[in-house]
Image (cartoon, rainbow, N blue to C red):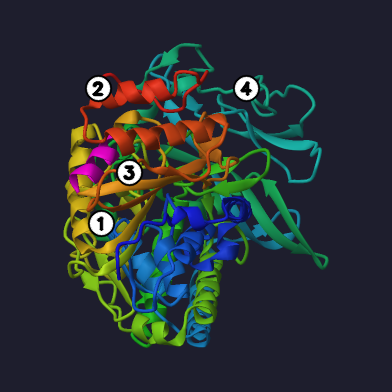
Amino acid sequence: MGVTTRSTLDGINWSAVNRATRRQVRNREVYCPPISLFRWWARRPHALTRALLDASNLEPEDLVSDPFSGGGTVTLESAAKGHRVYAQDLNPWAVWGLRTALDGVSPTLLRAGIDSFWQKLRNSTSRYYATNCPTHGNGEILHTFWVRECTCPHCAQALYLYPYSLITLAGRKRNEKIAFYGCSACGRVTQRGTARRVACEDCGHELAGMREPLLVQKRVWCPHCSQEVSYRDAWSRKPKWKPVLVQRFCSYRDKQIVHFDEPTPTEVARALTCVNTPAPLLEKIPMGRETAVLRRGGFRKWSDLYPSRQLKVLLKGVKLANDPELDRHVRSRIQLAIAGAGEMAGHLCRWDRFHPKAFEALANHRFAVLGLAVETNLVAERGRGTLKLRLRNSLSAANWAQTHISEPNSRARQRVAPVEEPGGKARQCTIVAGTSSKQRIPSNSVRLVITDPPYYDAVQYGELSGLFIAWARAVTGRRRPWTVDLRFEAVPNETRKAGAKHYESLLRSIFKETARTMRDDGKLLLTYHGMDFRGWAALGRALHWAGLRVEALAVAHSENEKDHPKRNRNAFSKDLVIECGKNTSAYRAPVVVNASRRPEQRELLAAGVTIANHSGKEYAEMVQKFQQLTKRMRRRRIRVPTLF
């Protein structure tokens, strides 16, 4: 086959793709249920990936590769279209999730295994959250609210670190009139209306307004003596927690009632039960850019993030999941669900006080230590983040795979190695854990590479996944495969002294290896956006050094602008799609496929044109060219540091 000169991006209906993407990013798991199997922090839209595959005019025998597979969008879409695919990622958590999505398990077998496991788990753990409601009789606790307690060094009195006086509204109905407030002086909860200021019904302390923050920049003022409490005394010591509010699910007179109330003495005693913790969860939380937030907040071990009752439930699930009678794929899926439920850490999860619901500890791509945390009953029949929901999602993913992935591919998927092995290979699908600087593909074999490298100012994947990896060690009983060598993570991190040069060096080695695997007529399609020009410069120079040339550029919608991490931020909701080929012919300027007058698209295209035309230049010259292209813009998203 001769070298093609036609742009792949030019054959895409970008308006249709962007419309499809906007629909999908608001509810991704509906369009592709396997993504709900495991949390990952950077998944490209399935509509975009599908369009790139369709426009590439692949032959049945052509091989698709993704050296930064992460959440597995490229692998899942390629498998659904019957293509051979090679996926590799440094992080074993992502590899486990992707292998599980493609394990070819029978939905019927999975349903039977899940039902058996769930029945045993409910029978052995439901008593931990069972309660006798003073108003309605028998019920179950869905959520327990914990407030952090510390002692003022000036007056020696206890104070409570409520971030706001308002803990939660009583319900989600419009114009809800009832709310629950916490008192920072005595810790007690007061139920009052929402229309006026409130005083604590126990000690009389006047409470702040519903939206008035109490701990601005983590500064704490004693409500008794009005002196400031040092950060060390308030946050850095080992946390002391007090249960102050519960959400119960009760059946009363043939009605199901969900309501909030102060915990009874029996409920408090059950919340403080003791548990034996396995070694992986007793390991120290490593110091890093994100994990430093936990360390500064007084958490030293992973087990510190969990109330003992919640930890007891999860460990009971671990024991039941290791039943040798379970099919190995069913066992792996249950283990993955338990490890994933670790993100519901009851001393770290937040609560939406105006739309009552719990948030996962990692929902905003960051660790956050607050004075109020929420423990979710993970064995409840209802609720966000519960094991029941995660197992149901696993079954939906298995049904999707059976429907959308062809039978030959299914047989191949069953030959992918178990999760504990360092790599897995199959005729149709190969999934490998490890740095993509070394890929297990022959030279000149890949027809199409679709990938999205970590953005320069991106998420600290290795540090955030440390919580899941600790649980993976606990549920599988193995340590060897659950290690991430962060020296090979292409993400800047000042704690590890990894900056722009480190980022560029890793991208160079990975793209050089990727170019080795590509055929002469092969294409590399990558998506990228970043708010630091050093990342763009590193990307362009890495492509240039690897012998890859930018041939075409397009802008595609990629993110939900309403996601919490993007609210009130001048962030990108679109990606630049960059098409590259091997640099085997004379230079040609890149084709700009969908030029736009909108500032966001113009800025992305300006960055793309800069790295396409000037990637062989020094950083200062690239900065000058980019600033020339964007000089008419009133407001830029991309920061331009002077030094690389």
Which percent across, then down, holds residue 61?
34, 78
- Badge 4: few (under 14), some or many (20 or more) residues near its Cα, within 10 Å? few
User: Residue at label 4?
Assistant: 212
- Label 2 to label 3: alpha-carbon separation: 23 Å
Q: Is residue 546 above or below residue 32?
A: above
Q: Which sits earlier in the primary sequence, circle 2 or circle 3?
A: 3
Residue positioned 24% across, 70% down in the render: 445
- Residue 382, how many percent across, how many down? 63, 63
Question: Neighbour class for label 1 at 10 Å: few (<14), some, many (≥20)?
Answer: many
Q: Is residue 87 left or right of residue 307?
A: left
Residue 444: x, y in percent? 21, 67
Local SS, label 3: loop
Q: Secondary structure at mark 2?
A: helix
The one of 586 and 577 positioned closer to us in this rendering = 586
Q: Is residue 353 left or right of residue 446?
A: right
* Residue for badge 2: 620
Which callout, 3 or 4, points to the residue nearer the camera? Answer: 3
